[in-house]
Amino acid sequence: MMNQLTMRSAGWIFFVSYVMGILFTAWISSKGSPHHDNLMLFLAYVAVGQIVLNVIPAVIWCRYRKISLQTAFRLHKVSLRNIILSLLIFALSQIILLFFHQITEVVSQWLGVSYATSHYPIADSLFSLGILLLSIGIIPPICEELLFRGILLSGYAKRGLWFTAMVSSFLFALFHDNPYRLIELFGAALVSAIIVIRSGSIIPGIIVHMITNSTYVISSYIQGEDMLEGITTSEGPSLSILLLTGFASFITFMICRWLYTRFDHPETGVRAKRAGATAGIRSLAWIIPILLSIVVFVIKFWIGKSA
């Protein structure tokens, strides 16, 4: 009989990947960040960071503990119906995520800080577009889904659907090291987590993640600037726009909620294990890697602000 991932082991796998990624980036930065100027080096940087640091630790642990990789990574078949429903929910959720983006802009203004996006290379030719589609639109979506919607969802599954989805989404937002986009990143990750849990497979999550990242790369190429900066204004959204987007988000949420009920596969990987949640509550050791990750995030942000 194969073993199963625990909450504690899933948390430590994330912590190890997160810290190693920070150290790797710091080391690259100490060399003058050559990957910012050379797209092939950027591709190598992404491959090492995503494959070696985000996926390999999980594979090693699962092999060591005799845990099924198919189960841990949720590599299950998925019906065409569930893929279509996932794409519909993903497309509609962009209205809600736009609302989150606008709220973030407003809060940033209230706090007197400038909204900051994560900085990635912008394609200026078809060749560079192809390299960036591979290094941003393909590799990270696959590897990050395996870690966050595979390992973390499987590890926290015994605590129920919403706890599992929210914790994995919070760690996803933390992982991207941008305090200005925590709400947006959390929302995007939550959508992906819910459709992966509901469909019973990681495949829909990988598809929507690829679409998200590839859209960013292509749109930035067409605009000649970062896509997110293109939809961000210095004065922020007006009250009327905010109210309109908020109302549209409410309607969209109700539609997505209905679509959620139309999936033809129950979330057996999560709800079936809720009966065993009591054992997980007795020990709080699972929360230690999460708390340490938060501490690392705060320290890194503080150092960045002080530099």
Image: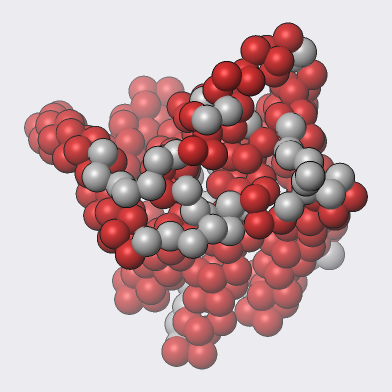
The image shows residue 29 at horizontal and vertical percentages of: 78, 58
Residue 277: quarter of image: top right
Quadrant in which the N terminus appears: top right
218 relative to 23, above or below: below
218 relative to 246, above or below: below
The image shows residue 119 at horizontal and vertical percentages of: 54, 58
Q: Residue placed farthest to the front in the image?
A: 1
Task: Look at 58% across and 52% down and name the residue there.
Answer: 74
Quadrant in which the C terminus appears: top right
The image shows residue 68 at horizontal and vertical percentages of: 73, 52
The image shows residue 199 at horizontal and vertical percentages of: 41, 49
Left or right placement of residue 100 versus residue 5 in this view = left
Q: Residue placed farthest to the right in the image?
A: 64
Residue nearest the observer in this picture, 157 or 175: 157
Left or right placement of residue 240 versus residue 202 in this view = left
Tell me if I can see residue 21 in this picture.
no
Count of all numbered marks drawn on residues in the image: 0
207 relative to 274, above or below: below
Residue nearest the observer in this picture, 25 or 90: 90
Residue nearest the observer in this picture, 121 or 262: 262
96 relative to 231, above or below: above
